Amino acid sequence: MGAVVPEVVDAVDVDDVVARVDVGSVVGRVDVDGLVRRVEINDLLDRVDIDGLLDRVDLEAVLARVDLDALLARVDVDALLARVDLDALLDRVDLDALTDRLDLEGLVTRVRIGGIVARGTGEVATGTLDLFRRQIVGIDAVIIRVVNRLLGRDPDTVPEGPAGLVTPVEPT
Amino acid sequence: MSPGRRAGSQRGRITGHYAGPLSRLLAFIVDVVVAVGLFGILSAMAAYVVSVFSHSTFDGLPRGGLGWILLLGGLLFLYFWGALTLAGRTAGKALIGLRVVSRDGQPLTPRQAFVRTLVLPVSIVTIVGLIGVVVGRERRALHDVAAGSVVVFDWGDRPAELPAPLTRWLADRPEAPLRLPDTPAGAADARPD
């Protein structure tokens, strides 16, 4: 029997046999889900050389196909930031080292502290001057009002200023 | 001085309105101080230069002498005329927030500035020439009448304003209510008076 089998096998035209098989119906009879359930995925993955697999992937080409704008549009940045523990993050930052790397002199030069101080001082001086002017103008207004009343003038007939500088106000 | 009419607590804007007597008096005092101070500095510099070149001590012209008066008068004239011609205002007027313009509001011409400066001493000496600043409808002094000029409030790039409390008080006067311009309420209230 053992000697006959090889001869029989040799006599069979495997290609002809395969050509006669309806592969579609054979596959249709296979319980793929059951087959998959019998596969130990973890063992399978353990046998996969991930590094080798990744070496064969052209990441640049993959990334080139990614629409980053669309991807980022789908990201809820607020929710993402809400999950960040800033205290823990800052604890990990060496602020001293970071400060040492800062060009503070250059920063001060660029900020022009002198300009800011000068502008602030100028605003204070301007405000003080206007305050002083308002008091004088107020006294003038009272003087003129008193004079107009003493002279019996109708205030509506007294011009406020040159026609080119003051728009006449319609009486209400 | 009865600008604008509107309720509320904003400040009445008076840019371009005829200036009152106190403003003009203070501006004139500042101008005299500045001009005389300038004269003192210039005369001291001149005395120093003369003493250096003449190798002798020169104390300047005798104070109160004719030459001293002419020089001081000349400097005052140049100070007022030059400032009014170039800027429409002297240092004192700029500090108080005044500007000299023609009666129609146009800038002062050099000729008007010249006449105004020339007649100014007459107004001051006679005193009578200044009465118009108080009682005149356009508050013009004699030198203003001669030059065809008026003095108005002008704080440069900022609006000339009345104090907010006075604005409110004047606006509430039934006999002659203050007319307030269209200014955004609140903006004016933020600053103290």
Image (tube, rainbow, N blue to C red):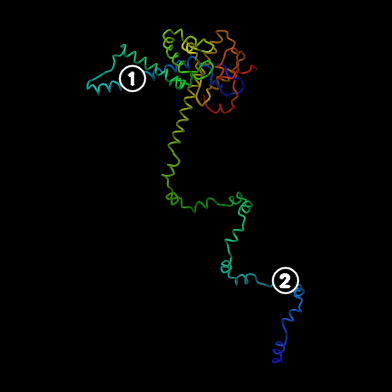
Image coordinates of residue B39 in percent, x first then y, are 35, 19
Q: Nearer the viewer, mark 1 or mark 2?
A: 1
Establish if B87 lies above or below B21.
below
The reply to whether dot 1 and dot 2 touch (C-beta < 8 Å) is no
Indicate which disc residue B40 carries.
1
Residue A138: % across, % down: 52, 18
Q: Tag 1, which chain?
A: B
Q: Amino acid at mark 2?
A: Val
Local secondary structure at mark 1: helix
Could you tell me the amino acid type at mark 1?
Gly
Q: Nearer the viewer, residue B78 or A117?
A: B78
Could you say where residue B154 lies in the image, as x and y percent from the top left? 50, 22
The residue indicated by pointer 2 is: A32
The percent position of residue B102, horizontal first and vertical second, equals 51, 16
Callout 2 secondary element: helix
Residue drawn at 33 percent across, 21 percent down: B42
